[in-house]
Amino acid sequence: MIRKLTARILVMGGLLASTAFAAAQQDSNTSTIPSQLTLQTAMAMLIRQSPILLRDQLNSIVARSNLRQAGLRPNPDLEITSESYPVFESNPGSFWNNQELVVRAGQTIETGGKRSKRIGVARQELAATESDVQNTLRELKLELKQRYYAVVLAKAQRELAEEILKQFDDIIRVNEARFKTGELSGLEINRIRAERARFSNDLLDADLQLKNSKTALVELLGVQDLNIAFDVSETLAALTLQLDLASLQREALQRRPDLVAETQRLERNRQNLRLQQSEAVPNVTPSFGYKRDFGVNTAAIGLSAPLPLFNRNQGGVSRASAEIQQQQYETSRVELAVRREVQQAYQTAQTQVEKVKALEEQYVPSARKAREIAQQSYRLGALDLIELLDSERTYRETVRAYNLALFDFNASLFQLEAAVGKEF
């Protein structure tokens, strides 16, 4: 007995230890981000541990359980009755031979193909639920790409603010040397020092934006430590894509999981109508049993079925017909929304390409060249401080606009991928 108890304790201890190890491993997985985070790694983390996706994946388990339940047959009935035993007589005699004892078993038979139709409804519901999970994943991927590249944008803007502040500090050091030799007035050097606060605030704002964008990305990945330190690997870049709107529209209508889910629900409602119509056909319950009537053994056979005189499931049929029409309208609405999203995303991407091209080929080089000339002219004394600061601000705003245009282009491309339901 002691050995058995010891063995049970060891087994339970092993189970608890393995459970604790698995929980610790899961906690470790959900609390760690690589120091250098790529978009591909972030995507894998999202699929593995996003609370939103894990929550919606449980809907498939619920739908699968409903499918299993739909395929079950009715339980058999068992009836045992005893009658006519003279319990109030002084000597009633044998209980076994002085009564009517009936033992009867019956099994309901579903008619009209109700079971197969019920299974069909549940199977279509499962398919629609799984498509919903894929649609959740589609939306989460879009959100992840947008948040990831928000970090990339914030990092680029911070690097720009740091570069400008560093170069302005170089100008301040030159002017402080000129001030010490009397070549520059006190008013001028104080104006330069005051102007530095603006560039310094740009760097502080860029730091804040980078921290906040990282926090938003970590939260989406389901990581508990929102202060975890990491860097992103991707950079802002514009891609050259040859895309055809008509082919994108056709592909979206075939691939978009939300539209697929609505189509599957429409088929589910059609199958449900057939199920509701079959409910008008009554089920039958044959039964077979044993009867002992005051010592005489006999067989008992029966058949029962409700008479469909009043209730032929008229309400269920009418409701199912209305649900089909509702779902047809909903499917049409989603199809129109898919077409609109693809067209808008395509148009946005085309416009962003033009913005990036103009900034890249014209405005950024011009602003950079003007800034270099202004800095050189200022050092030679051929340009005053106001004109130098104007060139610095123009360069800063142009490059910031260029970074933002690159981000907007990537965001529009991600939106187009989500609208089509396919990654390019």
Image: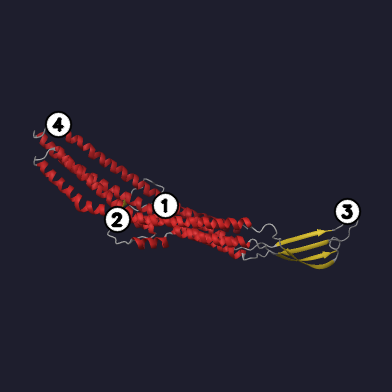
Kindly identify which residue carries mark 1. 30
Give the amino acid at mark 1: Thr
Kindly identify which residue carries mark 3. 88
**Residue 191: percent from the left, percent from the top?**
17, 34
Distance of mark 3 from mark 1, alpha carbons? 75 Å
Question: Which residue is drawn at the image coordinates 38% and 60% (left, top)?
Answer: 249
Distance of mark 3 from mark 2, alpha carbons? 97 Å
Between circles 2 and 1, the one closer to the viewer is 2
Between circles 1 and 4, the one closer to the viewer is 4
User: To which quarter of the image does residue 340 belong?
Assistant: bottom left
**Residue 398: percent from the left, percent from the top?**
22, 46
Q: Earlier in the sequence, mark 1 or mark 4?
A: 1
Give the amino acid at mark 3: Phe
Kindly identify which residue carries mark 2. 350
Kindly identify which residue carries mark 4. 187
Distance of mark 2 from mark 4, alpha carbons? 50 Å
